[in-house]
Amino acid sequence: MFFKKIKNKLGLLNLIYLDVKNTQSILAKLQESIGRLELRQLEYVDETEIHLNEFRAFSQWGEDGIIQFLIRKIPIDRKIFVEFGVQNYTESNTRFLLINNNWSGLVIDGGLEEIAYIKNDPIYWQYNLKAVNSFITKDNINQILSDNGIQGEIGLLSVDIDGNDYWVWQAIDCVNPAIVVSEYNFRFGANKAVTVPYDASFVRTKAHYSNIYYGASLKALCILADRKGYAFVGCNSAGNNAFFVRKDLKPDSLKELTPEEGYVAAQFRESRDEKGNFLYLSLEEEQKILSSLPLVEIE
């Protein structure tokens, strides 16, 4: 009787597991369908300001729509993307590109469990996607890309590692993306060109208890972009991702912006106390915390 009950419970758990997997599959298809409906609607609207083209199917905010807008405007020969800091890839900047536009790509994350999840996701056999587990530094990024066959011209590079974003993008020289998406730390404002000092072992949650000490300012990224031959064309309306287009590919309809013109301040409040509790601080209070921490000025 006891073993029969155990067997029945195991059978029930298996059914629950299968039901969850089926639900996840249905939700993913719904997200894809909604994204395609949004895209068709925007194709009839000629908005040159990138944030007016936003929608999200799989992206955290409106990045899916902005990326679709940019790839319609820019000639891209090699439809390949690279994205790092993807976690389990259910929410990302390139998943809609993979599914809707049939691009191929490489995604990188430092979590073993996250990469295992991606490799067990049906999209891993349905599309040309490669997932690699690695903790990215400025010293290993080119080797990681080259070892996985990513070199030369590519369509899109998405950088979001909550830390050394500036330094890693600065180091990348084995690929020449048409579009670069990079996270910026809005708390540094529009006028400061600063980044956290380089630390190969940087982890946002360990660098400072506040959880807001990471990354680079928009102006610092714009300076770097200009040196690499990219034009800043705007931010998402959420105020955390900046978009850059290679100057030799940029159409006249896309206006190059200054950091001051394109800066967007986010409204989300992520600051925490020493025990990890949310503080819900204002932007000014968060900026006061950052002012006491070491930063590198970019010139």
Image (tube, rainbow, N blue to C red):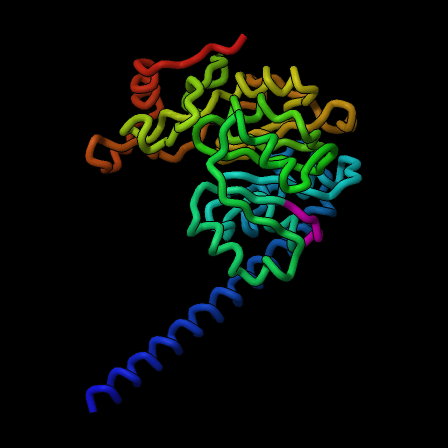
Q: Position of residue 225 (x, y in %)?
A: 62, 20
Residue 104 in the magenta stretch? The answer is yes
Q: Residue at x 45, y 25 (%)?
A: 215
238 w.r.t. 291: above or below: below
Counting every numbered tag in the picture gives 0
269 w.r.t. 39: above or below: above
Front-most of 247 and 39?
247
Position of 251 compared to 269: left or right? Answer: right
Q: Residue at x 22, y 31 (%)?
A: 273
Residue ranking furthest to the bottom: 1
**Quarter occupied by residue 146:** top right
Q: Position of residue 20 (x, y in %)?
A: 42, 69
Can residue 250 be seen in the rendering of this structure?
yes
Q: Position of residue 60 (x, y in %)?
A: 49, 44
Residue ranking furthest to the top: 299
Can residue 185 be seen in the rendering of this structure?
no
Q: Which residues are magenta?
A: 100-105
| Quarter of the image with the N terminus in it | bottom left
| Quarter of the image with the C terminus in it | top right
Front-most of 83 and 258?
83
279 w.r.t. 191: above or below: below
155 w.r.t. 112: above or below: above
Position of 127 compared to 208: left or right? Answer: right
Position of 122 compared to 266: left or right? Answer: right
Q: Residue at x 70, y 34 (%)?
A: 151
